Amino acid sequence: MSELSYQSPLAGVAEPQGLSISIREIDERGMIDLRGLTSDAGFMAAVKGVIGVGLPVKPRTSASWGDVKVLWLSTDQWLILSSRARAHELLSQLRDALQGYHSLAVDVSDMRAIIRLEGDGCREVIMKGTSLDLLDPEYVQGCCRRMRYAEIAALLDVVEDNVFDIYVFRSFAHYTWNFLCATAKAPAKLKLFGAQEVPA
Amino acid sequence: MSKPYRLSTGGRFVDRAKKVSFTFDGKTVTGFQGDTVASAVLASGQRVFGRSFKYHRPRGVVGLGSEEMNALIGVGLGARHEPNLRATQIEIFNGMAAVSQNRWPSLTFDIGAVNNAFSRFLPGGFYYKTFMWPQSFWKHVYEPFIRRAAGLGKAPEGRDPDTYEQIHVHCDVLVIGGGVAGLAAAEAAAANGAKVIIADENPHLGGLADISGGAIDGQSLPDWSAATGAKLYAAENVHVLNRTTVVGHWHHNFVMLFERVADHDPALLSQGVPRHRLWKVRAHQVILATGSIERPIAFANNDRPGVMLASAARGMVERYGVAPGSNGVVFTNNDDAYQTALVLKDAGIGVRVVDSRGRAEGALPNKAREIGIQVDTGSVISAVNTSWGGLNITDVKIASYRRGQGRVIKETKAEADFVAMSGGWNPALHLWCHNGGRIHFDDKLQAFRPKEHHDRIVAIGAANGTFGLSQILTEAIHAGSKLAGSGKVHPVPAAVQADERPLEPIWFAPATAKYNEGNKHFIDYQNDVTAADLELAQREGYESVEHTKRYTTFGMATDQGKTSNINGLGVIAEASGKTIPEVGITTFRPPYTPFSFGSVAGVLTKDLFLPIRRTAIYQWHVDHGAVFEPVGQWRRAYTYPRNGETNHQSIDREILAVRNAVGLLDASTLGKIEIKGPDAAEFLDRMYTNMFSTLKTAKCRYGLMMNELGFLSDDGVTVRLSDDHFLMHTTSGGADRISAWLEEWLQTEWTQYRVFVTNVTENWSQFAIAGPKAREVLQKLDPTFDISNAALPHMSFVEGRLGAYPVRVYRISFSGELSYEVATPANYGLGLWTDIVAAGAEFGIEPYGTEALHVLRAEKGYIVVGDETDGTTTPIDVGLDGLVSKKKADFLGKRSLEQEHLKAPNRKQLVGLLTEDPNDVLPDGAYAVRQVKDKPPMEMIGQVTSSYRSPTLGRSIAMALIENGRNRMGETISFPLPGGKVVRARITDTVFYDKEGAKLNV
């Protein structure tokens, strides 16, 4: 009947003003939720054969190969990131390759909203919503983990030193966006553990 | 006292070049940058800051900082007003409006002060004794009276215009207190590489160092504090927090810090800086360097404005250049207070010393005598006299004293206008004790000191009862050094300080008359508790100190006994013949000082008050006038009134559209869980009451889920996608709970099952197209699959495309009509929804909300878990025993369902109800009774679970759980409602519409 009409979770949201960091929605990202057993060598090899890189088995880490990135979610669960178009290919390739292996691969590209935070002071902004110690040396590029953020479930991916992606379930997109706009206001900017001015 | 008391020179904290004007009770007061409300108002010649809680006695400033219990004021106007702030901590700024509290009509003349004259009728335990009888008086007479007469400040008016926030931080070492001990410990810890936070409640670091005398490494203490502070500010691994009170300490060194970010500077607030910030700190190690709090002495009328702590008198002169009066008496039992005498003398203020000890031969007393200060040892102040109304001190009475003596016989009068008192120093133990730290009584100090603690926390310096400067530095540097890096202990700098001789305790200075005849000896100023009250409590049998506390209110409220604690225990000990350790100590509770509700809420206000979940169609619902209702955290469209319709009218319209044409529902909130694996079918057989292993691929089946107790916990339709792959629907509120429930059984009990479960609820937008014309609408959307009744019958499933949209289509119905639930990936949801609306226009499609959904299902007798069930309802109770498998070996709740009482015939069973008057709609939850009586109690036999007006049937319908209901078909039962009306209703079958289900299979 008509064209496919696509709306990202935060489509049409107003550009935020007066923030200490930049925040924006990451759109058009394909996501596959994959479950399987690391003890199953056939499963591990089959996945590597499709995505080009072994699944990360160390907790709270990610692995990348070209434009595909895999986030460790738990001991038997991963989130495979790619372009949206690529996710469809990957899913059918995975399903073919995993025939006969106990596993579950689901396209969840529409399940989450992704918000990218960029700039000096990102860590402090996120720490206004989570009890994680983002100043710990663990939180460098390649680290990802689930967290309780702003009272909801979220996923954090350290993209670069001052670049973070926060994943939340789609329905919480506007709530999370508003929470970030409230906590990232420029006048509320905070620098932890650095040289401070001596007050008058 | 009316003349200004600003000294011509001095005042370390004030900048005399910068004048600051503010108002106190509407009167303009001018002070200097750096003044507190306390120092500026005292400098202006005013001493009275408020009226006391119970007796409305005039009260002035007693302390220097957060220990202040008397001079509580309100700051700010209207919505920005904040009550009960300590005048000694509030920094003034231009335009500030401060007010005194608990006075009417004015500070100097207060009608409530009549309570003082009748004070013999207001003894300890007064509330318990007086307001007991008759019971009915409490609500209408006593409570309003107490609320008006007692209490402190007033609440702000209107919505708070400022912002607040919270942050979580971790550190290696949290140093609480920025005095000498805290600074030295922080420096040592930081030098060893630790990540350090040092928090101090004052605007400046240094604590009481600036008024303590002595030197470190040849530097004066203020210079040393400033230099050490500068190093900490500059360090990369230290975060210094000023104006930050540590309000509480909890398990595993979870510590809450309350930072007053912008209170002192309205310019910051207008820039949008958060007013307060609450820090939730997890510290590997806590160093408690909270210092100590000076004790008052209980003598007659020791609460008169002009009686203050010796440290406060000294601080007023040294910090702010403010004289506490023109001619004062220092009343002490220790050497430290002689420093106050020396400072006063140096500032040209008249002073003499009254020392309760028999001898005072330390370096400081000797120096005082040398410079000509009169020192009377073996003496006490037995009373202070005031001008009319107790506003100004005129003279003090001095009497000779030896410990344990009775009433004073002879006393001499000395002119004075202020008293600086010191009964010794108490380590500030509050934070140590918040989380179970043990303490012990030190006879030499006559105070409690920290003993052991189960957390990684150490007390140093005065907080540990260590008062010598060298010892403080040693403790601090050792504590700080050991915590990080190499643990290398840094050298302790040399310190010099005047030698001090020990104090002798004095808990009570005797007077000539009995206590209560104008001779009040205040112990707890904030709660107006006197020594006599504590003794009375002992005589009346309140032997436990915790009982005494509650009976007299001693040590309670915002003050938490900061200045009163040990003095009160001393009085109780003497009255009961026990030692202080035998009396024990009352509990210190967080917060150390009150902190704002704004900081507790942080940013979680207004639109962030609760996390709100939106479906992909949310904005369309808003744009089409939807009224919303909360379903869990979701906001779902309740109904779509238009053209001035009431909600009832629009709900009826939506229902009739579904019955007669076609409706469209946003059902995206339904839980959707993919379940896959070789054991998936068997797993589902165990989770559900009914059989799923027999379900054929591409077919749907309604399932009931029980918990182990046999009670219904969820329901929904599950489809078999392939041999080992299922998709389960749960209730909207149950998605996360059921997903976790499935995982729990797989991970903890049935670990042999090879099954994976993934909650995909949020990936899909899902809509019900329901009504006799549903198939025509679907056909118009250009499906890539056959939707005829033969190809896609009721309870079947197909995957394909509607036009360009990838979809999963379930032919299932919760309305009793021909119905398709169409799911598409959520980012296409809005596009497909608008296409369906457009395609359905010619068939009269109406979007319908959750209320229409509920009425439609109730007309069909379909249950809602949570309406027809309440957590104690079994499948048998709701008449769905047909869905409880008799064949399966086991499933959750099977065994429980075999219990006699769950099968008993007198259990409440689900029935339908038709009221005698079809226009009566029973309220939800209305009780059915066995017999209607004039008034309760009446015996209840059941309750209404769902009740609606059905536009389809043109009358009301209801469902109810009624005792033995299924055997009472046709019986009429009564529902007495509030107000006396009794609604009578006939028990029927639960299916009111299309009993044979003909409309489903078309």
Image (spheres, grey):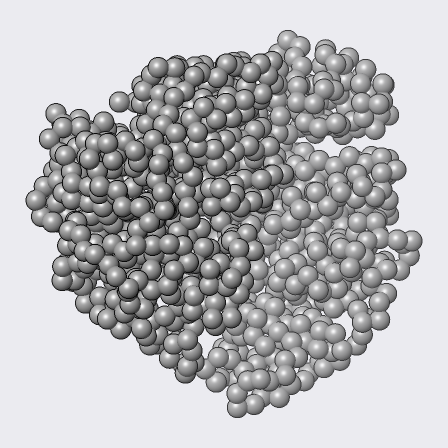
Q: Quadrant of residue B933?
A: bottom right
Give the mark count.
Answer: 0
Residue under the image location 54 percent in, 25 percent down:
B479
Residue under the image location 89 percent in, 60 percent down:
B886
Percent coordinates x, y for residue A199 in the rendering? 30, 22
Percent coordinates x, y for residue B230 in the rendering? 36, 17
Q: Is residue B45 above or below residue B318?
A: below
Q: Nearer the viewer, residue B549 or B875?
A: B549
Percent coordinates x, y for residue B584 in the rendering? 54, 54
Residue under the image location 62 percent in, 29 percent down:
A146
Q: Quadrant of residue B412?
A: bottom left
Percent coordinates x, y for residue B693 in the rendering? 86, 46
Q: Nearer the viewer, residue B735 or B595?
A: B595
Q: Residue furthest bottom?
A: B934
State whether residue B783 appears in this view: no
Q: Is residue B984 above or below residue B309?
A: below
The C terminus of chain B: image quadrant = bottom right
Q: Residue furthest left?
A: B3
State whether residue B706 appears in this view: yes
Left or right for A31, reference B902: left
Q: Residue furthest top?
A: A66
Residue under the image location 20 percent in, 48 percent down:
B418
Left or right for B176, reference B658: left
Q: Is residue B384 above or below residue B596?
A: below
